[in-house]
Amino acid sequence: MEMSRLPSPDKLVTGRLYIVGIGPGSPEMLTRRAEKVIAESDVVIGNDFYLDQISHLVQGKNVIRSRMGKEVDRAKECINLAKTTSVSMVSGGDPGVYGMASIVLEVLEHTGLAIPVEIVPGITAATAGAARLGSPLSGDFAVVSLSDLLTPREVIKARLSALFSVKMPVVLYNPKSRTRTEQLGEAIALALEYLPSDTPVGIVRNAYREDESVLYTTLGKVWEIEDLVDMHAVVFIGGEETRIWKRGEDVKGIITPRGYHRKYLY
Amino acid sequence: MEMSRLPSPDKLVTGRLYIVGIGPGSPEMLTRRAEKVIAESDVVIGNDFYLDQISHLVQGKNVIRSRMGKEVDRAKECINLAKTTSVSMVSGGDPGVYGMASIVLEVLEHTGLAIPVEIVPGITAATAGAARLGSPLSGDFAVVSLSDLLTPREVIKARLSALFSVKMPVVLYNPKSRTRTEQLGEAIALALEYLPSDTPVGIVRNAYREDESVLYTTLGKVWEIEDLVDMHAVVFIGGEETRIWKRGEDVKGIITPRGYHRKYLY
């Protein structure tokens, strides 16, 4: 039959796809692996904000700029291109944490194509921001996005309540946007149901980017600096044992002790 | 007075201290920043397992090898050295996630010394392992260590119950050691109180290291492969929406959809 002589969809695939985490924004914060797969790709696709952060790596390449909010279209486009060429889809931070990995894999699954795919992890905002604050996580922690674009608001609130009830440190991604301003206050109010008002809170804006700022406050006083929080910030809410780290009278950061004090003298 | 002519402790400090995350173990998984600060350090201190992973970066340096379990001594030693020289304390994965950052900062605080300190974030096992599994986290998630060396076992169980009750994906660090074998079964039993037995579970052993292995199972069947879990493994327990990612009949990995399906057709 004519049909049987047609190559199967898999045989048509000659390209490959990398879903690449580029970290918080500084060229120094990419891994060698991320640099290497971008260098080996003919096409680099991503949104403007992230492509600008790796402009030194994409000279001479076919660069496709997309816009925030167009993730599904971007996923389809990169898979279409990856049938016949090597493509890097870049994602801020880590592609598996509020990044492009899941939607690209979902769309790829729907196509049934056997495109070889590699996910390259990156430094996510939780650990980038933590490094700027001292050691606010140290042990068990959770990350929760306050964006209700893809997750119902009631689900987010239930998760936050559960986390605050067991007093684990929580990192809030997407704490605010221009149009979404209420959720941070709501999250703080939930935290105050379980944690004392002097629980440390750290805010890192533009970690490892221009205009980086790091602020310390407490749950009871977040409202004083809430205006400084925007979509470029990540908010760290301390757990039961989290405390301010000082040198003399100067606040140096936030520490959640790991628990060595329960076993050792130092 | 004689005393007032003595320099203050701060004046004696001429060194500096980096607490450096070296990622999961492959040289390709370090950031440029990590490589750079190690290159600029006269002394590199860490435990054998991690120093072996960066042997290409420490040629000609004063390398101080410590042992697992000697973290407090290691923290004191690196601070003592950093008074007068530049020191990199290396930590597997990210230093702020079950790493060396908190104990070093705690000991530094006790000394009162004004040693400049920089924490260099690294790829932690949650995102490294996730990259090998597909996209098991994607959105909100938590990491919990099953080691009760520094955290009481009851606290760990309460945290796990809270997390499973809101059906978030959970990454279990230190799921087992030679002498600590019961906690993984205990965690799985807690998960089964809230999640169906077909909830996907992923196990990544030696991510980005020699002898890497990736396994997929479900909550109801973990016992079949539990023997393959050891201290080099990280276990991913899916959340409410986590599912197996397939191509045809082949299991390719695990996906937790990010929620685009609630807004878009693809």
Image (cartoon, coloured by chain):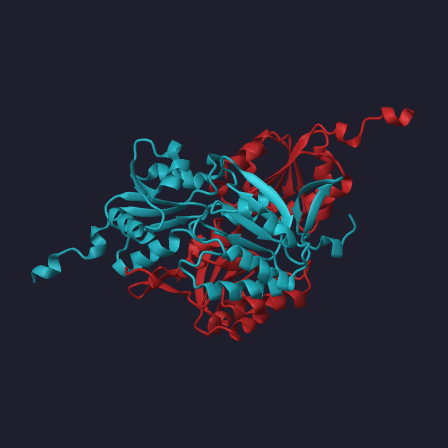
Chain colours: A cyan, B red
Horizontal placement of A113 versus A21: left or right?
A: left
The correct choice, above or below, for B55 with respect to B70 in the image is above
Where is residue B38, by image quadrant? top right
Where residue B76 sits: x, y (%)?
A: 74, 42
Where residue B257 sits: x, y (%)?
A: 39, 61
The answer to which of A153 and B258 lies nearer the viewer is A153
Horizontal placement of A110 versus A191: left or right?
A: left
Where residue B68 sits: x, y (%)?
A: 66, 50
User: Is residue B238 visible in this depiction of the protein?
Assistant: no
User: How many numbered callouts?
Assistant: 0
User: Is residue A231 visible in this depiction of the protein?
Assistant: yes
- Residue farthest to the left? A1
The answer to which of B219 and A71 lies nearer the viewer is A71
Where is residue A4, by image quadrant? bottom left
Q: Quadrant of the N terminus of chain A?
A: bottom left
Where residue B205 sits: x, y (%)?
A: 50, 56
Q: What residue do we see at 58% from left, 66% from top?
A: B160
Q: What residue do we see at 35% from left, 51% from top?
A: A69
Q: What residue do we see at 51% from left, 71% from top?
A: B223
The answer to which of A235 and B193 lies nearer the viewer is A235
